[in-house]
Every structure is written in structure tokens, then in C-alpha cells.
Amino acid sequence: IVLVLVFVVGIVMFMLPPVPGSAVYVFYGIVIGKQAQSTIGFWPGVALACVIGLAAKLVACVGQYAIGALAGKNVQVQKTIGVDTVPTRAIEKILSERGWKLGKVAILVGGPDWPTSVTCGVLRLNIPQMLLG
């Protein structure tokens, strides 16, 4: 039950724009690592925390994408993001590439999580390809 609660709390934390991802990972490492210490051991607990952290991160990215997809139906949101501007179209073209391309990975990893995932939703990009990058 602790793993489920920690997973849900992590997703909520990831969904909040001001919360940095590193805080969520530290939270996972401390809580799961400590809980696992008496059963499977500290280091297997840390490995489990990494897996659960990755899963929560991917679920949160899909949630942020969904926010963008819903908000992207609003013309004002599209105008604010500038979906018809050259920079946004360039980002869309780069992110639409399949696989791990340097530009795509640079945008998805180097960009802030919340705005990047929401923008992917507004642009209706391929979810599995977004998560792969």
C-alpha cells in the first residue's frame, strides 16, 4: 500500500508545474529506500524507486499531454502558444520525427517538463514517440 500511495503522490507532484522532478525522485528514494531496507534491502529498494519513479513520470507526462490536448481546442490557447508561428512549427516538425533524434531528445529532455508535455498535447503529437524521446 505504501508503494501505491507513493506512486500517486509522485504523479500529483509531477503534475504541478512548480515542483521540480528531482524533488520527486528524492522523495521516492527516501521513502521507498527506507521502507525496503527491512525487507528486500536498501539498494534493491532504490532500484524499485527508480522503476516506480520512471512509471510515475511517464503517467504524469501523459496527464500533462491530456491537459494540452484539451486546452488546445481553445483558439486563445493556440494563439498564446503560437501554433502557427515558425518556431512552434519547427518544434512540431522535430518532435514528429520517429525514434531518438538528437534534436527531439534535446527538446524533450532539455525543455521544462510541464510546458513541453502540454505543448505536445496542444500540437497532438504521437504519445508513444513523445515518451520514447
Image (cartoon, rainbow, N blue to C red):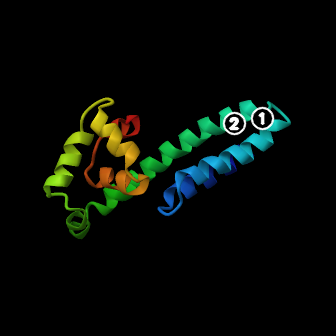
The structure residue drawn at horizontal position 54% and vertical position 39%, both measured from the top left corner, is: 54
Q: Is residue 100 left or right of residue 54?
A: left
> Tag on residue 46?
2
The structure residue drawn at horizontal position 57% and vertical position 50%, both measured from the top left corner, is: 22
Instruction: Identify the residue under disc 1.
Output: 42
Q: Where is residue 52 drawn, in percent x and y?
A: 61, 39
**Res 47 → quadrant:** top right
Q: Secondary structure at mark 2?
A: helix
Against 112, residue 133 (above or below) is above
Q: Residues within 10 Å of mark 2 (few under 14, many from 20)?
A: many
Q: Are marks 2 and 1 in contact (CB under 8 Å)?
A: yes
Residue furthest right in the image: 38
The structure residue drawn at horizontal position 69% and vertical position 36%, both measured from the top left corner, is: 46
The amino acid type, in three-letter code, at marker 2 is Val
Q: Where is residue 74 drawn, in percent x and y?
A: 25, 66
Q: Is residue 68 left or right of residue 45?
A: left
Q: Where is residue 109 drawn, in percent x and y?
A: 40, 43
Q: Where is residue 120 drawn, in percent x and y?
A: 31, 50
Q: Residues within 10 Å of mark 1 (few under 14, many from 20)?
A: some
The amino acid type, in three-letter code, at marker 1 is Phe
Against 15, residue 125 (above or below) is above
The structure residue drawn at horizontal position 22% and vertical position 63%, both measured from the top left corner, is: 78
Is residue 76 visible in the rendered image? The answer is yes
Is residue 1 visible in the rendered image? The answer is no
Q: Secondary structure at mark 1?
A: helix
Against 31, residue 50 (above or below) is above
**Res 49 → quadrant:** top right
Q: Nearer the viewer, residue 95 or 124?
A: 95
